[in-house]
């Protein structure tokens, strides 16, 4: 599975600089990707790593590494843009919107193919992922919006991303 290094930032000024002004006015578009590789707490890092592990292994096996990386980063970028527009002075961190984009692709497929849902329920980590999906959205309104945007982007990508031939 494709995994990238993740930086844990405790009180680093980098997080404060991910705003509407720095991304769009100063044309620092790279921040729409790099924020997804920062975390502010070890528990957040571990929760996201497990979520990515359980959804990522399955999705990458189904679509291939290139499509998996595209879904992951498209979810990260679009959720980042939407959150910057909604909260221009806020800051962003964490891979959650990208993970929720991956979940969104699977949700799209599950709606169309019940057998795929039955197959996925037998995977290791299914119950963790369901708890991750529910509990991580109870951390606040901005977190819910952030995750929801990633999920919606992923769900829409699910119409374009096709399962590899077996």
Image (tube, grey):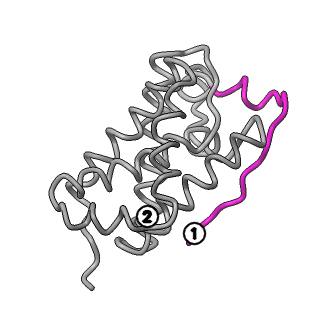
Using the numbered discs, state the Cα–Cα distance from disc 1 to disc 2 in whole angstroms.
Answer: 8 Å
Please say if 157 is above or below 58: above
Please say if 78 is above or below 67: above
Secondary element at tag 1: loop
Mark 1 closeness class: few <14, some 14–19, many ≥20 residues within 10 Å = few
Please say if 46 is above or below 66: above
Read off the residue under disc 1: 2
Magenta stretch: dominant secondary structure: loop
Name the residue: 45% across, 57% down. 126
The mark nearer the N terminus, 1 or 2, is: 1
Of 84 and 126, the residue lying toward us? 126
Horizontal and vertical percent for residue 57? 49, 68
Assess whether mark 2 and mark 1 are in contact (beta carbons under 8 angstroms): yes
Horizontal and vertical percent for residue 61? 41, 75
Total numbered badges shown on the rendered structure: 2
Q: Quadrant of the N terminus?
A: bottom right
Read off the residue under disc 2: 68
Dividing the picture into quarters, in which one does residue 26 lie? top right
Please say if 4 is above or below 86: below
Dividing the picture into quarters, in which one does residue 114 lie? bottom left
Of 62 and 78, the residue lying toward us? 62
Instruction: Identify the mark at residue 162; answer none if there is no mark.
Output: none
Secondary element at tag 2: helix
Horizontal and vertical percent for residue 121? 36, 61
The stretch drawn in magenta includes residue 12: yes
Of 127 and 95, the residue lying toward us? 127
Mark 2 closeness class: few <14, some 14–19, many ≥20 residues within 10 Å = many
Residue lying farthest bottom?
166
The stretch drawn in magenta includes residue 125: no
Is 68 placed left or right of 91 in the picture?
left
The residue segment tinted magenta is 1-18
Name the residue: 70% across, 49% down. 46
């Amino acid at each position: 599975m494709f995994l990238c290094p993740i930086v844990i930032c405790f009180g680093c000024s980098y997080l404060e600089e991910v705003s509407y002004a720095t991304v769009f006015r100063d044309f620092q578009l790279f921040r729409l990707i790099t924020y997804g590789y920062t975390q502010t707490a070890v528990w957040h890092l571990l929760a996201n790593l497990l979520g990515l592990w359980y959804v990522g292994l399955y999705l990458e096996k189904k679509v291939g590494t290139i499509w998996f990386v595209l879904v992951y980063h498209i979810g990260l970028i679009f959720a980042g843009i939407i959150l910057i527009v909604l909260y221009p002075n806020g800051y962003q961190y964490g891979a959650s919107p990208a993970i929720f984009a991956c979940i969104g692709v699977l949700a799209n497929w599950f709606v169309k193919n019940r057998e795929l849902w039955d197959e996925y329920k037998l995977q290791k980590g299914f119950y963790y992922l369901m708890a991750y999906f529910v509990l991580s959205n109870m951390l606040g309104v901005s977190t819910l919006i952030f995750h929801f945007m990633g999920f919606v982007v992923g769900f829409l990508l699910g119409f374009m991303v096709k399962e590899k031939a077996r």
